[in-house]
Amino acid sequence: MTNLKTVLMQKANNLRIHSIASTSKAGSGHPTTCMSAADIVSALFFHAMRYHPDEPHHPNNDRFILSKGHAAPILYAAYAEAGIISHEDMMTLREIDSIFEGHPTPRFAWAEVATGSLGQGLSIGVGMALNGKYLDKSDYRVYVLLGDGETAEGGVWEAVELAAHYKLNNLIGIVDVNGLGQSQRTMYEFDIDSYCRRFEAFGWNAIGIDGHNFDEILPAIDKAKASTDQPTMIVAKTFKGKGVSFLENEDNWHGKPIADEEQLEAALKELGPLSHNGEIQIERPSDVAVAKPEIVEIAPPDYQIGEEIASRSGYGAGLAKLSDANSTVVALDGDTKNSTYAEEFMKKHPERYFEMFIAEQNLVGTGIGLAKRGKIPFVSTFAAFFARAYDHIRMSAISRANIKYVGSHCGVSIGEDGPSQMGLEDLAMFRAIPESVVLYPADPVAAERLVAEAAAHEGIVYIRTSRPKTPVIYSNDERFPIGGCKVLRESASDQITIIAAGVTVHEALKAYDQLKAEGISVRVIDLYSVKPVDTETLLRAAAETNNTLITVEDHYPQGGLGEAVLSVVASEGVKVHQLAVNGIPQSGKADELMDKFGISAKCIVSKVKEIV
Amino acid sequence: MTNLKTVLMQKANNLRIHSIASTSKAGSGHPTTCMSAADIVSALFFHAMRYHPDEPHHPNNDRFILSKGHAAPILYAAYAEAGIISHEDMMTLREIDSIFEGHPTPRFAWAEVATGSLGQGLSIGVGMALNGKYLDKSDYRVYVLLGDGETAEGGVWEAVELAAHYKLNNLIGIVDVNGLGQSQRTMYEFDIDSYCRRFEAFGWNAIGIDGHNFDEILPAIDKAKASTDQPTMIVAKTFKGKGVSFLENEDNWHGKPIADEEQLEAALKELGPLSHNGEIQIERPSDVAVAKPEIVEIAPPDYQIGEEIASRSGYGAGLAKLSDANSTVVALDGDTKNSTYAEEFMKKHPERYFEMFIAEQNLVGTGIGLAKRGKIPFVSTFAAFFARAYDHIRMSAISRANIKYVGSHCGVSIGEDGPSQMGLEDLAMFRAIPESVVLYPADPVAAERLVAEAAAHEGIVYIRTSRPKTPVIYSNDERFPIGGCKVLRESASDQITIIAAGVTVHEALKAYDQLKAEGISVRVIDLYSVKPVDTETLLRAAAETNNTLITVEDHYPQGGLGEAVLSVVASEGVKVHQLAVNGIPQSGKADELMDKFGISAKCIVSKVKEIV
């Protein structure tokens, strides 16, 4: 029987050959970054990890996240060597009809998540590890392979903090320290000690090794597996381009395939032929049963029309009811739970609530990990602070994560805290996320109903909630389907239609009353579904009200409610006038600010009179 | 003469009184977070820092950044105690006509930058410190006061890395470790050692102190000042609400003023009356002269029509020419300089180029700091990765920073690297930044000219560059004013207008040729200025081409070029049809992807024929 080390070395060599071959064929890609990781990847895929080769989504598989996503070719090579994909398929790397993309996406089922925007993988690992340790109570481990350059990303250190805080001993990171970034050497080059000290200072086990020596790799992994209360980072000293003399540790080879035919031949000659010896036995995971989801009907809203209650309070109440109604729903918040009202969930089901502290990138990444492990995460913070995590949100769409984002404190209507706390571009952010749903309740009835809609919907949902107390305007049995809207005021003599959402619905209703008193009849629509938009109702309204609409939003003019309306009526030549926050806001009372920045009832009345 | 310690203690007590009084009057604010910091703030403002009380922008003033921006009341209180603002003005905290906002903004000149979105101040400090040490060669120091909860933010650790890497001994941070976050205790509570170990592991001096004991505060500051090659973090153990017995270290007082009259009275009674003894002498900074800017005319572009050159290459060439023409221009990049071509600047003026590694939040924060110190930073990375720094970008607008952002690798046209690397929402992001300018060159002539326009413009500019090589279409003497556009094809018989930018200009020109061959005449406009948009030209085109426009962009449908056009023609009832990237893209050749995702010449031709 072939010695384990020999087999793993041969497999690693095969991985190097595949990485070069596939990228040279594709004409692009990152072979040298694959080559530094080959021995580690071999040790993980062919020895350390437990998985069912036929079942990429088996709930107890060890999970592997390639945080250094540009090493995608070696990921595919590993699955080829494991016999899970064919060599022929692997060689379709980067072709338009291939699922083996330049950076991994879940179009390839084993990739589970999309990576390639550096510094996100460890957070996703935190989510998966939290799920394993505290929710599924499974013994799967989560392995995350990072590049050294990417550990400059603050998001990595957020994940490091939270993993230590939650004692995620089932999370094992490996940093591939090859000393080279994209355009130059990294800050720390080969200072393995410095890496180890930093991870240790944050509460991890850190093990420095020679990343090309299985006598160090294998014991390190064993030690990491044995940890009972700390995550482990294996810090591996490696060489980019390892295995080919003219590539090894050379500058200027990042992101370059071997294009020159002679060079390619020389490289493959050095590596030798593919080895077909060495049967590997992939260990299967244990058979821990995952609890079946318990889903019952969610309790309905229970408010009085006219009560003054903020939509964010409705969110808290709705989320708490959801927590009782669906055992797969989890909640995460960034130390704002007493403002977003995520704390209502925490009070009911603390075992499914995870405080993620003031670290929004990791907040979102953790949500992605939980979503991929079959939970439905409701991830909340101030709307403005989702901007801190926008790259993670962007990647969550490419990952096709079933994740719900809830941003409170939108708009100038938060008042005196001022612009640093105001979400004024979040509708633009979330509308631009492909396949997203964007919902904006005007009262707590709507908020509760939209929470349920969001949970029932498969895919990314963003719910925008407001801080101020405003009157309940909907009866408790009102429903709010995604893609709908509510026509709140309507008559045969409407001269114009006002389209609003959230706090501006209340301003529009005030404006309606003022205009009516002056003999001007207007239609008022609550566009609670900002994406997708109820095109039919909008076009009908336009047709019935002089082909003219006014949109009014507590948001900047770009990319939000106004442009959402514009984009669906534009081809029909409907006239649309936009009211939105018309400058950088400041501190002040909510009413004063809405007036000063152009979105109050007074401003709406003024605009209507200007047009009709 | 009154003892220094006694004076500083009295001043600190005054600061506590002011913080309570102003927030109680305002009815909102964060008094307890001010009270933990009072002794530190007193030591800094009335002893350690050197500044000219009449000149907030003096180039040699020590700089103070309140990273924990919610402690704004104590910032204003400090300036009141220094005699720089009046007590009456300080008490206008949070009122609509006041410059003393809930979180600091530069409407108050001494604040210099806006803070309040936690975890950004240290990066801004890095920028100011880099300027002082390497550019101005001034001996000013930069003090940054952070909260403990906010050190969970990854952005803080990015700043920590870069500050150590650049040996910023003139940067002194103080963490106010009061153990309490917003909604609960922090992860590390009062473990001062843990904080110190972490900062030390990253290469800082770290000094743990009792933050309420001047016998520890003052020597720590002196030690920090004496550092020659490392930044210093003073880790101060404090109590939130220090000075008032029923507030001190109590849960649930974050963000709450003392509203109850009796409680307010009791609190003020405990603190005692304002002290008016104790003259403080504010040390003046030394008189280092800052070099006068040297600005000459920038060299013109030098290309041949038809040459195949990417707009990103034009950016590199233009930036290099600008570096020769304007000595205040600096460049920063996030380890992508060989892709964005920021390296062209680095080759010419390495003394004004700062590599910021793979850490985009700090990349932007550093840019803000440099901008505030009178430099013009050109900050570059992939367009997609600006999403990582969107909160910093958002805050840079509130800071009114004169900063230029340049995002390369936009759209599906980057090809095989796939969606993780594609900027598809960056036009939405930057359009939604108030007062921003958004520019999108179609060829290297335009790119060079727009670099010059950006440098001449006061305020935030975003330039979007493309990866593929496309033909030079403009002559070298062409000018590209902000707010303009180029009508590339025009005739009296145009049936429709196609509006494009960047790579889609070239697709539109191909479509023009195909349609012409079939007897269909179309207008083609290059909308290189996406914000502000040339409304006049667009309306004229609409009027002359059947009131119908087609927009086509290498960007998602939301918030980009199409909606920019819509927003200016909407009130006129112009019909607009939008072509944009119509799904989550994947790896493939650029041409294949543009076809598959709806923005190629073929798709444009198809759309035109569908409409006319």
Image (cartoon, coloured by chain):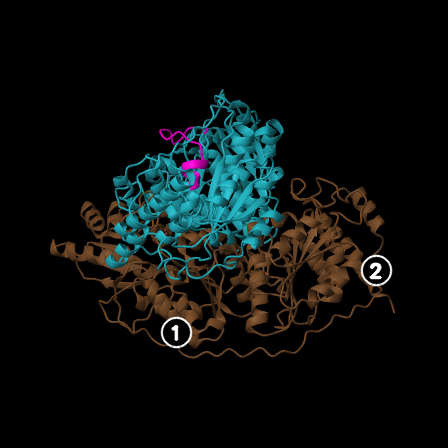
Chain colours: A brown, B cyan
Identify the residue position indicated by label 2 in the image.
A275
Is residue B261 part of the magenta span, yes or no? no
Asked if badges 2 and 1 are on one and the same chain, I answer yes
| Label 2 close to label 1 by CB (< 8 Å) | no
Residue shown at the point (84%, 55%) measured from the top left: A273
Q: Residues within 10 Å of mark 1 (few under 14, many from 20)?
A: many
Q: Residues within 10 Å of mark 2 (few under 14, many from 20)?
A: few
Q: Can you see residue A481?
A: no
Amino acid of disc 1: Lys
Residue bearing mark 1: A321
Q: Residue furthest right?
A: A1
**Circle number at residue A475:** none
Q: Can residue A438 be seen in the rendering of this structure?
A: yes
Residue at the far front in the pictured view: B1
* Disc 2, SS: loop
Pick the residue in front: B157 or A119: B157
Measure the C-alpha gap from mark 2 to mark 1: 58 Å
Asked whether B528 or A401 is in front, the reply is A401
A306 or B212: nearer the viewer = B212
- In which quadrant is the N terminus of chain A drawn? bottom right
Is B28 on the left-hand or right-hand side of B298?
left
Residue A542 lies left or right of residue B11; in this view the side is: left
User: Which x, y percent locates residue A448?
Assistant: 35, 69
Secondary structure under the numbered disc 1 in the rendered image: helix
Q: Measured from the top left, where is residue A265 in percent x and y?
A: 82, 46
Q: Is residue B158 above or below residue B460?
A: below
In the image, the segment drawn in magenta is B43-60
Quick check: B124 left or right of B78?
right
Q: Chain of mark 2?
A: A
Q: Residue furthest left?
A: A518
Q: What chain letter is assigned to the residue under label 1?
A: A
